[in-house]
Amino acid sequence: MPGSVESSVSEPWWKTAVFYQIYPRSFADGNGDGIGDLAGIADRLDHLVDLGIDAVWLSPFYESPMRDFGYDISDHCAVDPIFGSMEDFDRVLAGLHERGIKLIVDFVPNHVSSDHAWFVEAQSDPSSDKRNWFVWADPEFDDEGVRRPPTNWTASFTEESAWEWDPSPEDPSSGQYYLHLFLPSQPDVNWQDPDLEAAQHDVLRFWLDRGVDGFRMDVLNAIGKDPEPRDVPESIVGIPQVVLVHHDTAMPLIRRIRDTVDAAGDTFIIGEIVTGDIEVQASYQGAGDGVHASVNFASVWTPWERDAWADLLANTEAGYPFGGPTWPSYVLSNHDNPRHRTRYGGHESRARAAAILLLSVRGIPFLYAGEELGLEDATIPPDRVVDPGGRDGCRAPIPWTGDGDHGWGPGAWLPFPPDATIRNVDAQKTGDVTMYDLYRSVLAARRASPALQVGSLDLVDLHPEVLSFRRRHGEDERTVHVNFGDEVVELDTPSATLVVSSSGATEGTFDGHLPGGAAVVVRP
Ligand code: NOJ
Ligand code: CA
């Protein structure tokens, strides 16, 4: 039975955990208004137990005008009414803990909503203490006397200047620019101001006191900015590049964040460090005094190609000095990118093989709700686009049932993903050898194997179309083969016992025969 075998590895909980991301707007609707909410999550927790994940990352549910769907916070310590109440949040947290599942929540340290009281005060009263909680700059003037921002930095979403002109409340002919690496309605805060830093630590403590097990920290590297804002080369657009090189400014701030989070006990921080460079990501873990892990963007950006994945695994193995304090993560899908099944061309076989790959590499896997149903992105007609970054497709509501509303109120906030009459939780739980069954089996196989959870990883070169690697921990050993090609291959490898195959099989003998697009986990 999946789930009946527990492994005996003694490691921090987060190292062996499989995380499951819930984007609250898209997960489940508790009150029938068509928008996912905390009550909807609280009612569906048994799904997570049945699936077999260990921890949930919950995207923002805080008070927000929702211009960036919650990543623009107007009150860090309040639940937005669209998502419910603090009691609903407590119900989610208690319900998860009763089921032995950890909860990490989003911490958005780089910016707030322009509706946040901090910014309202800073903007309306330049003499206020809060003024320096944001990043202001005087205008510069070109030869014709035309006003321009202090640097050429561009913002995400718009690719226009990251500096917004803000006329002085007393004298509109003068003023200052404020910095926003995202929307103009998401002003960046100034972590060099000690009072702002203290206020952010209060936010962390507020949620730790309520009992959360840690945080996913949004664009965390962006809090360490160039102390002397200066132009970047023209080829560099968008946010991360502007701040990437300021590790030295960010790290002392991150170390103090770690201290605050550590003080609450057995907690975990995963930083969104926006870079595909594995070594830069790993560097934010410091000497065990930075983040515990960083979001692995390289795994999102790697195409479904054997050599690309071999390189990613090799680079990750080389970039993380295992045995020291660093540990990688892996992720294929989230709320910011097209789902991996969509990126990989929609094929069922690839989505199945990807489940095996993601859950058998060395690092913390992050699943995105719905991938266990094999969901693809929804097609969003132009008149239903709501996100300024065009990310609606991957945020389509999770279909729970096969009927027209799929368990949502009439008029869900976005269209459903394709094939929701079969790719829904009810159908997947009752059908034969579904994607859901496969995820359950692979999760159980991982949980039962110290080698898969924490073992070493060695690439094995057996066939140009097949990614093969061996995982070992003590006596425990697993080998994984993923056939990226369409043709059947016969691998020259000793006969082994099948643990799980992308076809759904969980027993039998593996003699090296691997159909096109298939993946297997085997043991000696
Ligand atoms: C990364 C988040 O994942 C994304 O959804 C958001 O728009 C930006 N950071 C800004 O907070
Ligand atoms: Ca709702």
Image (spheres, rainbow, N blue to C red):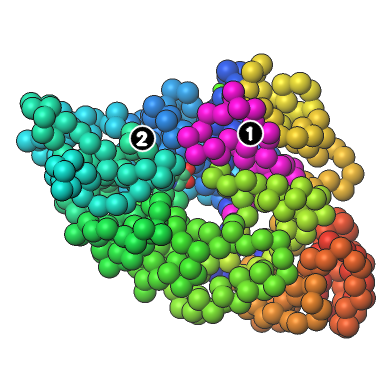
Q: Is residue 370 magenta?
A: yes
Residue in the image at 56% along x and 29% along y: 385
Q: Is mark 2 within 8 Å of ligand 1?
A: no
Quadrant of image for the C terminus: bottom right
Residue in the image at 18% along x and 41% along y: 147
What residue type is disc 2 on? Ile
512 sits to left or right of 313? right
To which quarter of the image does residue 432 belong? top right
Q: Quadrant of ligand 2?
A: top right
Marks 2/1: CA–CA distance = 22 Å
477 sits to left or right of 503? left
Q: Secondary structure at mark 1?
A: loop
The residue pinned by badge 1 equals 396
The residue pinned by badge 2 equals 73
Viewer-nearest residue: 342 or 72 = 342
What residue type is disc 1 on? Ala
Residue in the image at 64% along x and 18% along y: 411
Q: How many marks?
A: 2
**Horizontal and vertical percent position of residue 136:** 18, 44
**Horizontal and vertical percent position of residue 39:** 55, 27
Q: Secondary structure at mark 2?
A: loop
Between circles 2 and 1, the one closer to the viewer is 1
Q: Which residues are magenta?
A: 366-395
Q: Is residue 20 magenta?
A: no
Quadrant of image for the N terminus: bottom right
Q: Is residue 280 above or below residue 505?
A: below
**Horizontal and vertical percent position of residue 337:** 58, 47
Q: Is residue 320 above or below residue 231?
A: below
Viewer-nearest residue: 101 or 250 = 250
